Amino acid sequence: MTTTSPTTGSRLARLLRSSAGIAIAMAVMNVGTYGFQIASARLLGPGQYGALAGVMALLMVLSVLQLGLQATSARRIAADPEHVAAVEAAVLRTGWRTALVLGAVTVLAAPVVTKLLRLDGLLPAVLLGLAVVPATVMGAQAGVLQGERRWLPLSLVYLAVGVPRLLLGIGFLLVWRSETSAMLAVLLSSWAPVLVGAWALGRHPRRATNVTEGEIRRDVLRETLGGSAALLAFFAMANLDIVVARSVLDEHDAGLYAGGLIVTKAVLFLPQFAVVVLFPSMSTGTESRAAVIKGLAFLGALGAACVAATYLLSDLALIFIGGDEYAPVQDRLWIFAVLGALLALLQLLVYAGLATRGVATKYLVGVGAVVLVGLGATASSVTGLATTVGAVDLVVLLVLVVLQVVRHRR
């Protein structure tokens, strides 16, 4: 019998409690999340997968309140750790309230979503609205853990995002191959990280302070809405191109574009752990500049490596996105990798703006999203749309870099 030595066990525990543990957990989360999309692309084919990709893109856009809550609570706790109890109570209460309101509005808008994305029925759009509720609550929970830099429980939350989605998604699609089945799996799996987050927060009692929840709840909501506006603009830039594709391209080409976006999203979310780990540092004045520079250097290098790998290993990338049915887009997959690299850099700069409560970022990215939709609507091919999206992303990225330079000089 082989036993694990105390030294090995302690090393593993230290790893899981470090920022490296977050990197591992988020890598597994992304493998699970995009494994679900790969399985869906294979089992559904370009036509039905294009519809599912559109629904998932809208889910990403609607998840901005989740990310806004996470950024707000993480920033406030990192900047003022003495008031964790009050911030946690305010954020969780705000999270549940906004989740229920957003979910109800999305369910009511299901007929519009069904028509816009040309879905086979109303149910996938209804399931989308229901899935928004746990996704938003999870953001509030994750923000508290991130602000306290409690990497182990936060890692468990991220693991609970990806693994159940992959397992339930494949199981449901093997039984019933439709976008409705896939969205039902997404809804059920979305409650797993909420349960893990509730367990993690319940095991860590807070020290009472002289600041009450009521005193900061309104400020938390205001900051959350401001941060969510910036993140909404970013996720609009990152996800609305598939909606444009479903509108201006035929069903087959829109499905090919959706397949290419699997590469884009993989490159975008591969280094997401860096944003999570660096955000508390970007929220403190003494560490902010160095954290932004470190993040840009790391994401730029990793993005360039991903583009090169996609270009040189396009056969492998084709298998990754769904196989021979997507062969017509194989020689252009490197373009989608470029889109992912640009979006990863944009995401870092958007969070850098949130960390310093800058107001210009959301307007700049919002203008970029509007321009992307307007110019994208004139495209008539997969390559034309991808090239247009890349050009808009690059311009917005350069403007945000200049804005960061100006901020740090001040």
Image: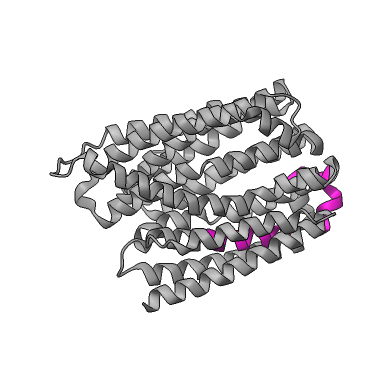
Q: Farthest residue toward the top?
A: 175
Name which residue lies at 73% across and 24% down: 121
Write down the quadrant of residue 254 in the picture: top right
From the image, give the main secondary structure of the stretch colored magenta. Answer: helix
Asked if residue 371 lies left or right of residue 316, the reply is left
Residue 246 vs 316, above or below: the answer is above
Asked if residue 144 lies left or right of residue 133, the reply is left
Q: Farthest residue toward the left?
A: 210
In this rendered view, identify the residue nearer to me: 145 or 133.
133
Q: Could one spot residue 147 in this view of the protein?
A: yes
Q: Which residues are magenta?
A: 321-347
Q: Quadrant of the C terminus?
A: bottom left
Q: Does 25 lie within the magenta span? A: no
Residue 160 % position (x, y):
48, 35
Q: Could one spot residue 307 in this view of the protein?
A: no
Name which residue lies at 64% across and 56% down: 370
Residue 89 % position (x, y):
27, 37
> Total number of numbered labels?
0
Write down the quadrant of residue 396 in the picture: bottom right
Name which residue lies at 30% across and 47% down: 219
In this rendered view, identify the residue nearer to me: 233 or 150.
233
Q: Quadrant of the N terminus?
A: top left
In this rendered view, identify the residue nearer to me: 147 or 14.
147
Residue 162 % position (x, y):
54, 38
Q: Does 333 lie within the magenta span? A: yes
Name which residue lies at 53% across and 58% down: 347
